[in-house]
Amino acid sequence: MTDRAAPTGLRIAEALSYVCRRRDELAALLVGNDAALHALEAAAGRPAVDDALLAGFLNTLHKAVRQAGDPFGVYGGTGRSVTPAGVRDLDIVYRCPLRLCTGRSGDEVDGDVPHCRFAPPGTALIRERLP
């Protein structure tokens, strides 16, 4: 099982970050067929969820998103680097409080601190400056 103190596999973390960041867009795309999204949200919010279980839910969601017309799915939309392009020293980043995903760069946030879609309601991402 995955220890919440240790990050999950990079591919899983990037895909979870993508889903968290674009949850509303994905729900709109999957309207009427959003069971895979809800199943992933429920699984990711449980304590001690393991990587294999998350990967299974992400794979199911990935297929549903592609079938709904997004050719990149949840894996293709994550980019190729953990470090967002243009991040410099002293940039603001927002970390996942559950250490499940890669979070967001400050450039991706407009105004209010974003909330984690997989944590209890109202749980904000952790704002930090890069060293």
Image (cartoon, grey):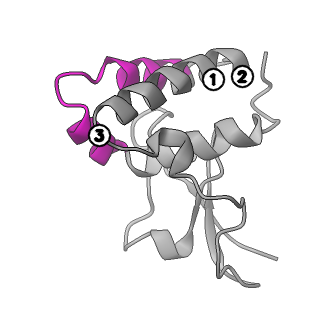
Give the x, y percent position of residue 26: 32, 41
Q: Are marks 2 and 1 in contact (CB under 8 Å)?
A: yes
Task: Specify whether 92 is left or right of 7.
Answer: left
Q: What residue is rendered at 68% in x and 79% in y?
A: 87
Q: What residue is rendered at 60% in x and 54% in y?
A: 103
The amino acid type found where label 3 is placed reads: Gly
The amino acid type found where label 2 is placed reads: Asp
Nearest the viewer among 73 and 128 is: 73
Task: Specify whether 91 is left or right of 70.
Answer: right
Instruction: Examine the rendered structure and indicate whether residue 85 appears above or below residue 7.
Output: below
Task: Examine the structure image and report whether residue 35 is included in the region drawn in magenta.
Answer: yes
Q: What residue is rendered at 39% in x and 49% in y?
A: 22
Q: Is residue 75 visible?
A: yes
Give the x, y percent position of residue 30: 25, 32
Residue 51 is labelled as 2
**Which residues lie in the magenta part?**
23-43
Q: Is residue 45 visible?
A: no
Q: Are marks 2 and 3 in contact (CB under 8 Å)?
A: no
Task: Please identify, in this view, whether the residue under mark 2 or under mark 1 is nearer the observer.
Answer: 1
What distance separates the C-alpha of mark 2 from that of mark 1? Answer: 6 Å
Task: Specify whether 110 is left or right of 13.
Answer: left
Secondary-structure class at tag 2: helix
- Residue at which label 1 appears: 55
Q: Earlier in the sequence, mark 3 or mark 1?
A: 1
Which residue reaches farthest left? 32
Task: Please identify, in this view, whether the residue under mark 3 or under mark 1 is nearer the observer.
Answer: 3
Give the x, y percent position of residue 11: 69, 40
Q: What residue is rendered at 29% in x and 40% in y?
A: 69
The amino acid type found where label 1 is placed reads: Ala
Secondary-structure class at tag 3: loop
Task: Examine the structure image and report whether residue 62 is included in the region drawn in magenta.
Answer: no
Q: Residues within 10 Å of mark 3 (few under 14, many from 20)?
A: few
